[in-house]
Amino acid sequence: MVGRGVLKECLDEPRVEDVLVVGRRQSGEQNEKLREVVHHDFFDYSPLSTEFEDRDTCFFCLGVSSVGQDEASYTRLTHDLTVSAAEALLAAAPDMTFVYVSGAGADSTERGRTMWARVRGRLENRLLAMPFQAAYIFRPAYIQPMRGAMSRVFWYRVVYAGIGWAYPILRRLFPGKVTSTVAIGRAMIAVARNGSENRVLDSHAINAIADR
């Protein structure tokens, strides 16, 4: 859902010259500056190393829910999978900026009681320590899908459909908790282009950057 929203903003942004999407399936988007690679092993990017060499930025939006998973499984699909991608990108393009979509409540101490928060916090710390030109962590809470972005989880779609009309009100009432796929995409582009004083950005910071 987030990835599709970010993609739409990248395709609409004139300052974004070229977009490479690496995914499990075609996005269905049609644009002259879009190139898509269908890839299935997200722990091995060796076939794509030359594709990464001329890239300025990675917007990493892939993620899974922790519901029904033990810590080992969630670590593999969240921490290990993302680090595999980051290491491959760093080897091919060390001057790259890496922007990762995490989540509100991630535990930077890595010692809290909540499993998913510990894993996310450990991953965030690992990414921020890697020698990219720059790395940023986005920690949104509630994300309203817009412009055709849609969750693959049925019950999420029901929730979004039910309260989507209230998004402008919710964002005004809870600016630190509510954002959208449009705001995340615009803020990612702005941070990649201009940098940010803060390397970890919550919904309030994401919205402020997007609005500017």
Image: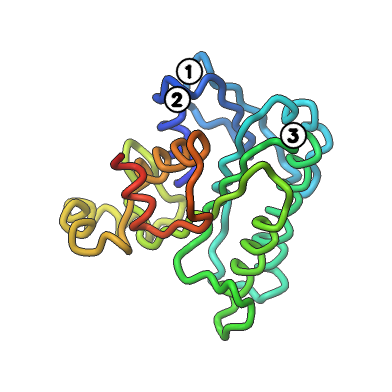
Q: Is residue 122 visible?
A: yes
- Mark 3 → mark 2, Cα distance in angstroms: 22 Å
Extreme residue toward the right, this view: 46
Q: Secondary structure at mark 1?
A: loop
How are the residues colored? Answer: rainbow
- Mark 3 vs 2: CB contact within 8 A: no
Classify 10 Å Cα crowding around label 1: few (below 14), some (14-19), many (20 and above): few
**What number of labels is visible?**
3
Q: Identify which residue is drawn at 30% across, 58% down.
A: 178
- Mark 2 vs 1: CB contact within 8 A: yes
Q: Identify which residue is drawn at 45% across, 56% down.
A: 201
Q: Identify which residue is drawn at 47% across, 25% down.
A: 29
- Mark 1 vs 3: CB contact within 8 A: no
Q: In the rendered structure, which disc, 3 or 2, sits on the residue that comes first in sequence? A: 2
Q: In the rendered structure, which disc, 1 or 3, sits on the residue that comes first in sequence? A: 1
- In this view, the mark in front (3 or 2): 3
Disc marking residue 31 = 1
Q: Secondary structure at mark 2?
A: helix
Tell me where residue 39 appears, x and y as whole percent. Answer: 70, 36
In the picture, residue 58 is in which quadrant?
A: top right
Task: Please state if 9 lies on the left or on the right of 199 as rendered.
Answer: left
- Name the residue type under label 1: Asn
In this view, 88 is above or below 80: above
- Name the residue type under label 2: Leu
The residue wearing badge 3 is 93
Task: Please state if 25 lies on the left or on the right of 80 as rendered.
Answer: left
The residue wearing badge 2 is 11
In this view, 178 is above or below 1: below
In this view, 61 is above or below 51: below
Q: Is residue 68 visible?
A: no
- In this view, the mark in front (2 or 1): 2
